[in-house]
Amino acid sequence: MTSHSNIAGSGIADVTIPDSQLARDITQFVRDTESDLLFAHSTRVYFWGGLRGRQTGLKFDSELLYAAAMFHDIGLTKSYQKSQLRFEVDGANAALEFLRSRGIAEKDIGTVWTAIALHTTPGIPEFMGSEIALLQVGAGMDIAGRGYETFTDEQRQAVVAAYPRGKDFGNKVIDAFYHGLKHRPASTFGTFNDDFLAAKDPTFQRVDICSVIRSSHWEHAHHVH
């Protein structure tokens, strides 16, 4: 792994990586588990989420947000090449196991689990707890530039200087999603994750819910009224 300029305790625009043993353990675990691409992405997600929280006056637990941000894409790594679960659930379960082994309160573990599990689900996290809402803000900003204009030039430059996106980040992260999902296409139904498979695999066929409804047992059980 290459080194990165920010370490625990340093900060950007009043957002800092928690200077705690738990945060250091999380950083080391994720650095050892993820590619540089996903590690830097996950750290930027923490800063985008934290910055939005500061902007809006939303109170949040920095340690929980950091845990959620750093674990949110663990499910795309090689350890889960045989999993048939949604990758979000793999990441949520990995965070749960890690935090539980360190004696973190179950309520806090539940917050992190939910934040990770829902981070690709539109329209729901923003109505839930702060860390859950802010993780989705951060992920959406870093992947798709959602809310880009709500951050200042200085904030964007500082985050990317500390944790560079590198060349062609967009296509590289699409590849990372594809390789993390291609063995479990059924898990992408009902999410935008099927877009990654459709973009990279010309033979991939999306499941259409209308076809599912029309071909269900109910439609062929004429004797049922």
Image: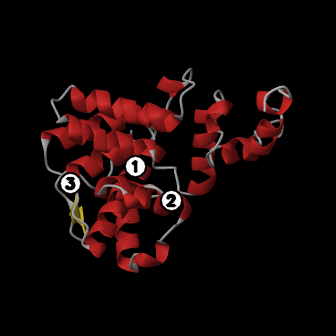
Disc 2 is placed on an element classified as: loop
Q: What amino acid is at disc 1? A: Ser
Rendered image: mark on residue 61? 3
* Image position, residue 161 (x, y; %): 38, 64
Q: Which residue is mark 1?
A: 42
Q: What amino acid is at disc 3? A: Asp
Compared with 54, 130 (above or below) is: above
Structural crowding at the residue carrying mark 1, measured as other residues with C-alpha within 10 Å and reported as few (<14), some (14–19) or many (≥20): many
Structural crowding at the residue carrying mark 3, measured as other residues with C-alpha within 10 Å and reported as few (<14), some (14–19) or many (≥20): few
* Image position, residue 82 (x, y; %): 56, 20
Quarter of the rendering occupied by the C terminus? top right
Q: Is any part of residue 100 visible from this angle? A: yes
> Camera-side residue: 154 or 57?
57
Q: In the rendered view, does 76 fall on the left or right side of 222? A: left
> Which of label 3 and label 2 is nearer to you?
2
Q: What colouring does the structure picture have?
A: secondary structure
Structural crowding at the residue carrying mark 2, measured as other residues with C-alpha within 10 Å and reported as few (<14), some (14–19) or many (≥20): few
Residue at screen point 21% across, 63% down = 59
Q: CA distance from mark 3 to mark 1?
A: 17 Å
Picture quadrant of residue 177: top right
Q: In the rendered view, does 83 fall on the left or right side of 108? A: right
Q: Which residue is mark 2?
A: 123
Q: In the rendered view, does 132 fall on the left or right side of 100? A: right
Disc 3 is placed on an element classified as: loop
* Image position, residue 129 (x, y; %): 31, 55
> How many discs mark residues in the rendered view?
3
Say whether marks 2 and 1 touch (CB < 8 Å): no
